[in-house]
């Protein structure tokens, strides 16, 4: 099955770390964006991660329904079926989930996976993110402990955020200040609370100046060397090389060198959303500008059905998004690194 089993997902993460590459984790909000991600991974010969946020899941359930669990389950069901046609492994992940959405998103989805595993089936999602960046570190890690105990039994990987990503995503905002830089002390507290693998696998989003949203290179001060410092110091404590499985959030506008450095320091997953949103929308705008009198019934005319058929510009949008994801696979060095 192209949707990775828990064992295959762990193999994917291990291979990325050993081979110094990272998987693009693509936010999707529809089957169209899902198709774009799958097609891109296949063309790049890269395994990958498809993820859905709380807002994305609400949208997937229908704008009049707004049920995050329904939307996430629907996305997973579609992915399990559609991905069968592609020669790559794909993992399903739920993105940022703050404390006020845990009971309406991650915990119910985790319960579904627990029930599936109890029946001898695979979990519905391969990993879930708990975003505790808006609460004190002690509370963040206390909740992470509770979730890790459940995810490990359900054969699911947990993702935690230690530090704060600036900007805004799905209504969660954070100021751009010194809190954007995770400290060694923060990382040490994380290992003390969650262990270094013996209590269950988790990925860690350590922050090094990351900001969600749109910005030009140079407008945000990223310091990927922080990742190296933390890996080195915690490595001394644990006796492990690069003890953290790192995640890169808020990477839009990052330079190629910043991305390369982060991957060298142990990033194995990089979230990509803002750039792919633009890559999806830009071809639609181009199509409408070029076919103005076809997509609209101008001055009493009937327009051109072939121009306003959603499939006409939908295919272009998917191709545009896929091209951006292929670029990400190449930049993150995952291209050509699929599990045989």
Image (cartoon, grey):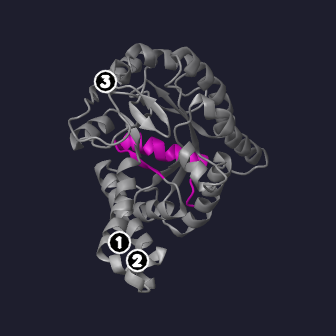
Q: Is residue 223 above or below residue 289?
A: above
The secondary structure type at the circle numbered 2 is helix
Residue placed under numbered mark 3 in the picture: 226
Q: Is residue 183 above or below residue 69?
A: above
* Separation (CA) of disc 2 from disc 3: 51 Å
Mark 3 or 1, closer to the camera: 1
What's the residue at 66%, 50% (across, down)? 124
Q: Determine contact: label 2, label 1, CB under 8 Å.
A: yes
Residue 295 image label:
2
Q: Percent x, y for residue 219?
A: 23, 34
Q: Percent x, y for residue 212?
A: 38, 37
Counting residues from the start of the chain, the first of labels 2 and 3 encountered is 3
Residue placed under numbered mark 1 in the picture: 288
Give the extent of the magenta segment.
Answer: 1-27
Q: Percent x, y for residue 249?
A: 40, 37
Q: Nearer the viewer, residue 201 or 282?
A: 282
- Residue 193 appears in view: yes
Residue 166 image label:
none
Q: Answer whether residue 13 is magenta in the image.
A: yes
């Amino acid at each position: 099955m192209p949707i990775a089993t828990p064992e295959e997902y762990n193999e994917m993460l291990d291979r990325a770390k050993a081979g110094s590459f990272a998987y693009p984790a693509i936010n999707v909000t529809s089957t169209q964006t899902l198709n774009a991600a799958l097609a891109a991974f296949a063309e790049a010969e890269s395994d990958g991660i498809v993820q859905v946020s709380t807002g994305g899941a609400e949208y997937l359930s229908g704008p009049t329904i707004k049920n995050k669990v329904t939307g996430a389950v629907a996305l997973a069901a579609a992915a399990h079926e559609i991905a069968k046609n592609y020669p790559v492994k794909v993992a399903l992940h739920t993105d940022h989930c703050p404390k006020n959405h845990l009971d309406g998103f991650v915990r119910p989805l985790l319960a579904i996976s627990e029930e599936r595993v109890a029946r001898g089936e695979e979990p519905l999602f391969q990993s879930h993110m708990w975003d505790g960046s808006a609460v004190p570190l002690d509370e963040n890690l206390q909740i992470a402990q509770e979730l890790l105990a459940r995810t490990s039994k359900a054969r699911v990987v947990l993702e935690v955020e230690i530090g704060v990503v600036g900007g805004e995503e799905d209504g969660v905002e954070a100021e751009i200040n010194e809190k954007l830089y995770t400290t060694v002390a923060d990382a040490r507290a994380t290992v003390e609370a969650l262990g270094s693998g013996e209590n269950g696998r988790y990925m860690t989003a350590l922050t090094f100046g990351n900001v969600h949203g749109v910005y030009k290179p140079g407008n945000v001060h990223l310091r990927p060397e922080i990742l190296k410092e933390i890996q080195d110091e915690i490595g001394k404590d644990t006796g492990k090389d690069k003890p953290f499985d790192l995640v890169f959030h808020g990477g839009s506008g990052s330079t190629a060198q910043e991305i390369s450095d982060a991957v060298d320091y142990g990033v194995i997953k990089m979230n990509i959303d803002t750039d792919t949103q633009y890559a999806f929308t830009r071809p639609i705008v181009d199509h409408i500008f070029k076919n103005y009198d076809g997509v609209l019934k101008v001055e009493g005319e009937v327009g051109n059905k072939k121009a306003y058929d959603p499939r006409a510009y939908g295919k272009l949008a998917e191709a545009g998004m896929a091209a951006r994801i292929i670029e990400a696979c190449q930049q993150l060095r995952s291209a050509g690194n699929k599990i045989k």
